Amino acid sequence: MELQVPENDLQQLPQMIIQWKQTQEEVKNLKEQIRDLNIREKAYREVIMRVMKKNSIGTLDLQQSQRRIVYNTKEKKKGISAKQLVGQLGEFLKSEEEGKKAVDFLLGKRQTTSVETLVLEKL
């Protein structure tokens, strides 16, 4: 969403700052509500999964909504930290030092981006 800025943008700056602060507060309140709903949804999901697993229910048909709930289990690879990468590369290269050099090289070659932000600080 692009805001239309009038020619006298310097005169409008105080009003724009007030509106920005109000919008920021609204976003904060909505994020709190979303966080609370996510916590509640996760609790329901965990209870439902526990009951389905305990009773060996793989699929549960929901008559009212013409849908079904399916309980699945799948393996997922975890992320890899720099410490794990050093250890695993050291094991592969038969030298911990060579592993550390490889990780330092890779981390040194990472691309960077510039991010501009606007922060409201309390005085």
Image (cartoon, grey):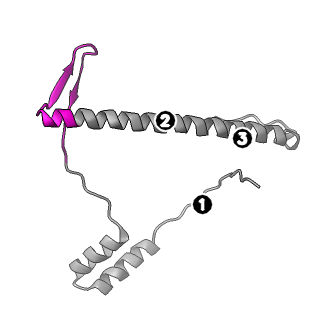
Q: Nearer the viewer, mark 1 or mark 3?
A: 3
Which residue bears the numbered disc 3?
A: 21
Residue 6, image x, y percentages = 82, 35
Q: Nearer the viewer, residue 104 or 66?
A: 66
- Splitting the image into 4 quarters, where does residue 8 fall? top right
User: What's the CA distance linking mark 2 and mark 1?
Assistant: 29 Å
Q: Residue at x 56, y 34 (%)?
A: 30
Magenta range is 50-74
User: What's the CA distance linking mark 2 and mark 3?
Assistant: 20 Å
Q: Of helix, strand and loop, which one carries label 2?
A: helix
Q: Residue at x 28, y 76 (%)?
A: 87
- Splitting the image into 4 quarters, where does residue 14 fall? top right
Q: Of helix, strand and loop, which one carries label 3?
A: helix
Q: Verify whether residue 64 appears in magenta.
A: yes
> CB under 8 Å between callouts 1 and 3?
no
Q: Verify whether residue 4 appears in magenta.
A: no
Against 67, residue 54 (above or below) is below
Q: Nearer the viewer, residue 21 or 35?
A: 35
Amino acid type at circle 3 is Lys
Q: Of helix, strand and loop, which one carries label 1?
A: loop
